[in-house]
Image (cartoon, helix red, strand yellow):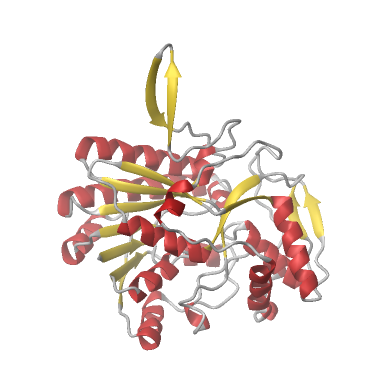
Amino acid sequence: MRILILGGDGYLGWPTAMYLARRGHEVAVMDNYFRRRACTELNCEPLMPVPNLHHRAELWQAVSGDRIQVLIGDICDYQFLSRVFREFGPDTVVHYAEQPSAPYSMMSREAAIFTLTNNLVSTCNLIHAVAEFVPDCHIVKLGTMGVYGTPNIDIEEGYLEVEHKGRRHKFLYPKAPGSLYHLTKAQDGDMLYFYCRMWDIRVTDLNQGPVYGVQTDESAQEDRLAPIFNYDDIFGTVLNRFIVQAVAGFPLTVYGNGGQTRGYLNIKDTMACIELALLNPPEAGKYRVLNQFVETFTVSELAERVQAAGRELGLPVRVKSIPNPRREAEAHYYNPANTSLLSMGLKPHYLTTEVLVGMLDNVREYQEAINSAHIMPDIKWN
């Protein structure tokens, strides 16, 4: 396929590009370097130095022989996006190009407005470009399990069948996002659902849980191809942060009582889920939702697992409860469905002690680069 990856410089975007190129697809990546600029402006640089996209593509071609086309520009600029669609003509677009951080969206009015504008305008521009230039193109949008919130009933995959006064109807599953970022992901899902019904576009919305991992199979042979790995409280996911805290000798910072439960997956499974979605597109006019996670854990359970893995390496890992900077339930029911991707053939990577030890070893190679000022969270929801 001809695959365009929007947000192709990010933690997931670049590994996805290598993964798909390695499997014979023609891949182009587009990015405006927002995350790099934000990391510099907020003084939360990633753990490992990351070459720019052009250099990454050159390194990848030297290592693998596979070419990845690089396009630097902003998806919110419709003229630029139109030119890309006319020239590249994608069969599939993978949309990672939204501002990806809940804490960032809650840090200030300016960050909130940027998140709202970037995430909704980018998605709307994408829809119009597909409709105008490649109407049969499959949009794969990275959503989030966070749109569901923590309801006191089972979470289905996107839809809920309701019986009311003797009649039945299937609705999009009710959404209760817990940050402005998650709210924009709920809103863009509604927008995509609307245009599927109005214009017969085809969309897969992958509601993904928090991702962890330092390397993928494609980057293991060359460290400079590794994903952008953040460990701060803005762009770092919880398990990646715990791994760095353990290596740096800081206690693992559990928010409140640590009962917050979410569905997690290895970054390698993100790549596999994307490929399965691409190879099994929905029919025209269909808004398909897949819940993309492998295992559920509480935050305290994650901390305990990192602590146990640390003992394997002789690391004296401590766990510390700190006041929760977020407004969220710390004890709740959580039972989400995730059968679709498994039925398509996903072979999950589970969070074993061996996996955690490997992550700790990866991070220890860069121990001297850890900035202790990034460790403690300071963005509060209120």
Which residue is drawn at the image coordinates 43% and 11% (left, top)?
165
Task: For residue 34, say whether it is visible.
Answer: no
Residue depicted at x 21% and y 41%: 200
Check the image and name the residue furthest to the bottom.
Answer: 62
In the rendered structure, the answer to whether residue 143 lies left or right of residue 46 reads: left
Quadrant of the drawing holding the N terminus: bottom left
**Displayed quadrant of residue 196:** top left
- From the viewer's perspective, is residue 259 above or below residue 9? above
Instruction: Name the spot of residue 286 as percent of width and height, x first.
Output: 28, 41
Name the quadrant containing residue 332: top right
* x and y percentages locating residue 101 in the rendered image: 53, 53
- Relative placement, left or right, of 272 versus 80 is right
Between 102 and 22, the one nearer to me in the picture: 22
Determine whether 34 is above or below 147 in the image.
below
Query: Which quadrant would the C terminus be assigned to in this image?
Result: top right
Let me know if residue 63 appears in the view. yes
274 relative position to 234: left or right:
left
Q: Where residue 369 sits in the image (x, y, percent)?
A: 66, 78
Residue 274 x %, y %: 39, 59
Which residue is pictured at 80% across the width and 66% down the height? 317
